[in-house]
Amino acid sequence: MDTSCDTLVALGTETRSGRTLFAKNSDRPATECQPLQAVPAGRHPAGRAGPLHLPRDPQAPETLAVLGSRPWWIWGFEHGVNAAGVAIGNEALHTRETPAGTGLLGMDLLRLGLERGRTADEAKRVITDLLARHGQGGSAQHGGRRFYHNSFIIADPSAAWVLETSGRHWAARRVRGRAGDLQPRDDRRRLGRRVAGHRGLCGGARLVGAGAGAPLRFPGRVREPRAAVPGGGALRRAAAASWPRSGRPDVPDMLRHLRDHYDGGTVHRPGRKDGDPEGWSVCMHPEPATGATAAAMVAELGPETPVIAWCAQTTPCTSVFLPVAVGAALPERSPAGRASLTDAPRGGS
């Protein structure tokens, strides 16, 4: 069963505090551990090899401190924020182009964007340059086969982008500072006509059978033409676009939305579908064989340092969101993870 995360951003011009707000629910297999990880800043000598995923690339001369939420078996992050106040979340995106069997996972691209980008513009450039050189691909499921392309919301204190990709091709739209541009992200999102994109995008669209013609609607012509997308994408996007019903959003509004079951409340009601015939609510409670909201984050992006992220490492409506400072050390056992719920480290609780 295909599922999709929920990611959204509200620029500071539209929030109560004047700071940009970023939020994401990460939907993954229900029994998969997704611990927080704190990556320290680093300075690297010229010629040092890059991360394991980039054997042909030199490491960046300087990398930023990052706080990210990492499925235990991969290197990359589902969502995160860096010390410069850049936050990124990714989504599964299905297009007419068959995903590659090997390449960078969307989560790897996300972490690299955070480590190397001091602004949303820089992080977007990091991701798109890596796509051009290395492509994306590989299974995003441990012990299984789940392949997809990726979309991203990339935000900093003053700007945000919606970036969508297919193979090495991409299109991006800058989020504008008016209330109507509160941007939810799910696998039904359409960029529309006013986009920046990969110079080979139109040719790429023809190669994947999307047809020629301008203007090009990237998802409209490139995404996979399925009659219905499981996971409740349309209703979940509508829920994100319709709030808050009055006033300007703040951190508690973001937390309330991530816990939402279409009833405006924060307490889970039995039954994952909650009356939605198409799929799941924003806060997901599926059966263990499918997917669940495994972790969530709300980041408040402003001029203050250190950047604070509010983090939950299980289903949001049953969790406490704990404030974590980017650059601070995590408790020693916090980054641990295992393949199954029964593989807890000995001596711990």
Image (spheres, rainbow, N blue to C red):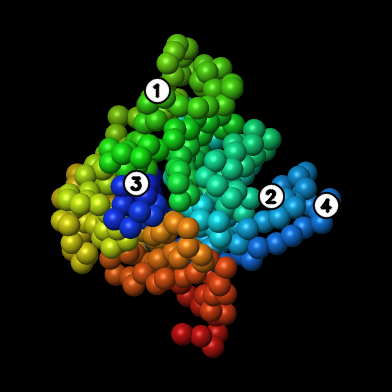
Q: Mark 3 points at which residue?
A: 13
SS for callout 4 = loop
Packing grade of label 3 (10 A; few <14, some 14-19, many >=20) is some
Q: Distance between the residues labelled 2 and 1?
A: 34 Å
- Dot placed on the residue nearer the N-terminal end, 3 or 2: 3
Q: Name the residue under label 4.
A: 46
- Looking at the rendered image, the disc whose residue lies closer to the viewer, 1 or 3, is 3
Q: Are the residues at dot 4 and dot 3 in contact (C-beta closer than 8 Å)?
A: no
Q: What residue type is labelled 2?
A: His
Among the 4 quarters of the image, the one containing residue 181: top left
Q: Are the residues at dot 1 and dot 4 in contact (C-beta closer than 8 Å)?
A: no
Among the 4 quarters of the image, the one containing residue 84: bottom right
Front residue of this view, candidates 131 and 173? 173
Q: Distance between the residues labelled 2 and 4?
A: 18 Å
SS for callout 2 = loop
Estimate the x, y position of residue 69 in percent, counting from the top left.
Answer: 50, 61
Say if 123 sits above or below 70 in the image: above
Q: Distance between the residues labelled 3 and 2?
A: 38 Å
Q: Name the residue under label 1.
A: 193
Packing grade of label 4 (10 A; few <14, some 14-19, many >=20) is few
Residue 264 seen in the current view: yes
